[in-house]
Amino acid sequence: MKFADLNLRPELAGAVADAGYTNPTPIQARAIPVVLDGRDLIACAQTGTGKTAAFLLPILQRLAGGTPLRHPRALVITPTRELAVQIHEMAGRYGRRLRLRSAVVFGGVGLEPQKRRLAAGLDLLVATPGRLLDHLGRSQARLGNVEMVVLDEADRMLDMGFLPDVRRILATLPEKRQNLFFSATMPDEIERLIRRTTHAPVMVEVTRRATPVSTVRQVVHPVAMIQKKDLLASLLRRADMGQTLVFTRTKARANQLVRRLEKSGRRVAAIHSNKSQSARTRALSGFRTGRIDTLIATDIAARGLDVDGISHVINFDLPHVPEDYVHRIGRTARAGRRGDAISLAAPEERVQLAAIERLVGKTIRREHVPGFTARADTEETNPRRRPQSPPARRFRPQSQRARTRASGGRS
């Protein structure tokens, strides 16, 4: 099938061709006709398969064929600022030949510019849940004209605790509307919400749930926890390491890696929730343009981050939630390209690795890197590097200060 077979308007078909796409992905080929037909949709597809275009293209087509109103006729709810900005940019790219108005609202920046944009009138609104509720509470956003609503990355909404906010937003929408739910996985709680919300939905599932794309080459490097930083620096010196996305579990670890890798000559930046929105925007912009070749991220970037040409994803820390592994490595091998996913696995992470392999349904290939050990803690084998702990005591009475603190009194 080609995009020309999907009956898109010439303006949209031309924009898709200008972007270099001829053939739709499986999720696009199956979802676009359903959305154009006005049906409710539940779409379960792994990350990196083109879900955003699967809902944006038919939404833009339907908006272009209707009467412009002051308040939005289509609403896209998404969990992160980065994904909201990305969807808004894609809407502008695909809809640039149509006379449509769109806006994006998210937290971390001032309300006033967003308020002015909402007041100017728009057809499509892209929003994160918390900031949209802020505008609704101040009567700065009105959703009474919404005909189509998209809940993107639905499972991520659950993971991030946004489900109550999402329910509040859905309750403000007109009862008669088209509901489109897109997600990489479909937890039971999300599925129950969807089925309570939709009417006779069409279910589209293009792959087994939580399966990495086949074009990602996966490998595990067993390594001691204290050697991970040195191994990461060694890997990044390889000639084939292009644009590389490195995932950590914590913000502190991300900052530590930036300082370590800057000394090795890599052009590095970090994105996580402690970074200001402007700092995160600069980091992503630099990564997209190649000015930054290594981006260190917590799982805030695990979904929806669409950067062309990421050659490698490195899991510095294995995620506690195995589904996050699939979302992380889906940042490479986008749109049919090949990519590499490297996981640095310490013996202390064997439980997480086993859970990941159960989820993806196979044993991931192990490669031992010369010079790096997989012992649980190399310091334990060298008593000169770690002082011996005193023998354990069966009972240790509280100090006077501890007793005072526990009783709430003053010393």
Image: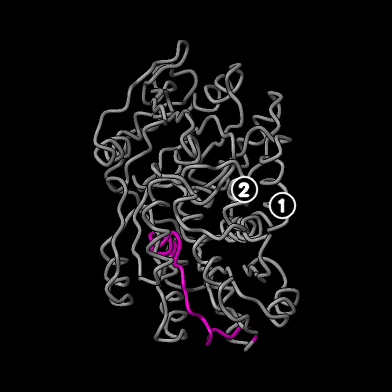
Locate residue 99: give its quadrant: bottom right
Residue 99 horizontal side relative to residue 348, left or right: right
Locate residue 308: give its quadrant: top right
Locate residue 275: give its quadrant: bottom right
**Which residue corresponds to the image point at 52% horizontal and 70% vertical from the top-left?**
62
Q: Quadrant of the N terminus?
A: top left
Q: Nearer the viewer, residue 370 or 165?
A: 165
**Which residue corresponds to the image point at 45% horizontal and 46% vertical from the top-left?**
24
Q: What is the secondary structure assignment of the residue under circle 1? A: helix
Q: Nearer the viewer, residue 297 or 119?
A: 119
For the view shown, which residue lies furthest in the top direction? 370
State the residue position of label 1. Answer: 279
Q: Position of residue 45 (x, y in %)?
A: 36, 51
Question: Alpha-carbon neighbours of circle 1 within 10 Å: few (<14), some, or many (≥20)?
Answer: some
Magenta stretch: residue 159 in it?
A: yes
Dots 1, 2 in contact, CB < 8 A? yes
Amino acid type, residue under disc 1 in the picture: Ala
Q: Quadrant of the C terminus?
A: bottom right
**Which residue corresponds to the image point at 49% horizontal and 24% vertical from the top-left?**
227
Amino acid type, residue under disc 2 in the picture: Ile
Q: What is the secondary structure assignment of the residue under circle 2? A: strand
> Bounds of the magenta span?
140-160
First in sequence, mark 1 or 2: give its number. 2
Colouring style: one colour
Residue 213 horizontal side relative to residue 247, left or right: left
State the residue position of label 2. Answer: 271
Distance, label 1 to label 2, CA atoms, is 8 Å
Q: Position of residue 281 (x, y in %)?
A: 69, 52
Question: Alpha-carbon neighbours of circle 2 within 10 Å: few (<14), some, or many (≥20)?
Answer: many
Mark number for residue 236?
none
